[in-house]
Image (spheres, helix red, strand yellow):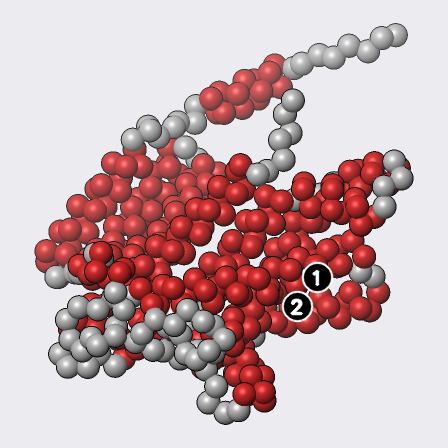
Amino acid sequence: MPQTSTSTPETASAGSGTSTALHSVGHLGRWAPWAIFAGAAAVAALLGMATGLNAAVFAIYTVALGTIALYAASRKVEGRRRATDRLVTCVVVSAFGLAMVPLVSLVIEVVSKGIGRLDSEFFASSMTGIIGEGGGVYHAIAGTLIITALTTLISVPIGLLTAIYLVEYGTGRLKRAITFLVDVMTGIPSIVAGLFAYALFAVFFGPGVRLGIAGAVALSVLMIPVVVRSAEEVLKLVPNELREASYALGVPKWRTIVKIVLPTAVAGLATGVTLAIARVIGETAPLLVTVGIINGTNLDPFDGRMATLPVYAYYQLTQPGVPPEFAIDRAWTAALVLIIIVMGLNIVARLFSRFFAPKTGR
C-alpha cells in the first residue's frame, strides 16, 4: 500500500510556532546604527566636558560605547546571530579606522608643513651657494630619477628572467635554492644592501668611494626580490591551456613564452615593476652609504657624489644650519615631493593594470 504522510496537530502547531518565531524577529532601522553612535558621541562629549578628555580618548570612548550599545540593541531586537554580525562589523571597521590614523595624520602633517615651499623656485634651483633662505631640490630630483632609472635597468631584466625560469623551466634543487635565496633577499635590511654595494665598489675604486651607480646597485639588491616575487605570481596566473594550445601547434617553448605568456601577463608584470620602483625610490640608508650628498647638480652617475631626495631631506633636517627654519621647511617640502612621486607611481600601476589587461570579452 502506498504510504501517505500525515501531520499531527502537534507537528502543525510546532511548525506554525517556528514559522511565527522566525518571522517575528525584528530589524533595526537603516539609520539606527548612526543614531546609536551619535548618542555614544554625545555621552563621550559629556564625559569629556566633565573629565577633560582629548580627541583620541573621545574617539575611543565613542567607538566603545557605540559598539556596546549597538550590540545590545541588536541582540534584543534582531537576535544573537545578527547582533554578533554587527559586533564583528564594528570591530573590523574600527581596526580599519585605527590603521588609517597614522597614514592620514602623516599626510596632513607633511602637506601642512611642506606646501609653503612648493613653488617654482624650489623645483628650478639647487643648493649651490645657499646658506639660509631660498634654494631648491632640482639637483636631488634629477639624481633620484637617474639612480632609479639605473636601478630599474639592472633589476627588471634580472627579476623577470629569474621569474620566468622559476615558473617555466625550474625544477629540483636549483629551483628550491633560488626560491630560498629570493625569500632571504626580501628580508635584507636596506643598510646591509648599502654596505654590500659600498664594499663592492671599494674593492675596485678604494675606500671612500661615492658614486650614483653604487647607489643603483644597492637599490637593485632590494628591488630584484620584489620583482621576482611579483612576476612569479603573475606568470603563475596565466592559464596552462594557453601554453598547451601553443605547444600543440608545434610552437617552441621560448616562443610560447615570448608570444603567449608574457603578452598575457603584461599588465600584472608592469604593475609589479612599478610598485617595486615605488618601494625603493624612497630608501635613504643605502644612498647615505653609497652616494652621499652634494649641493650642486651632478648628472653623471659614474663620477662622484649625487644628490637624491631622501638623502636631501635627511641632511636638511639633521644639519639645518643657522637659522634652521629654512632648511627644515625644505626638508618637509622634499618629503612632500617624494610622497607625490610615490603616489604617482601607484596611480601609474593602476592604469597599467586597467588598460593593458587582456580583453576577455568579444
Residue shown at 82% from the left, 69% from the top: 173
Residue 165 visible in the displayed image:
yes
Q: Position of residue 323 (x, y in %)?
A: 13, 79
Residue behind mark 2: 182
Q: Where is residue 119 in the image (x, y as percent from the top left)?
A: 21, 56
Residue behind mark 1: 162
Q: As displayed, is residue 246 above or below residue 159?
A: above
Amino acid type of the residue that numbered disc 2 sits on in the rendered structure = Val
* Left or right placement of residue 151 versus residue 33 in this view: right
User: Do callouts 1 and 2 mark residues in contact (Cβ within 8 Å)?
Assistant: yes
Residue shown at 33% from the left, 41% from the top: 70
Using a 10 Å C-alpha cutoff, classify the residue at mark 2 as few (fewer than 14 neighbours), some (14 to 19) or many (20 or more).
some
Q: 17 or 112: which is nearer to us?
A: 112
Q: Is mark 1 on a helix, strand or loop?
A: helix
**Residue extending farthest top:** 1
Q: As displayed, is residue 235 above or below residue 291?
A: above
**Residue extending farthest left:** 49
Residue shown at 58% from the left, 84% from the top: 200
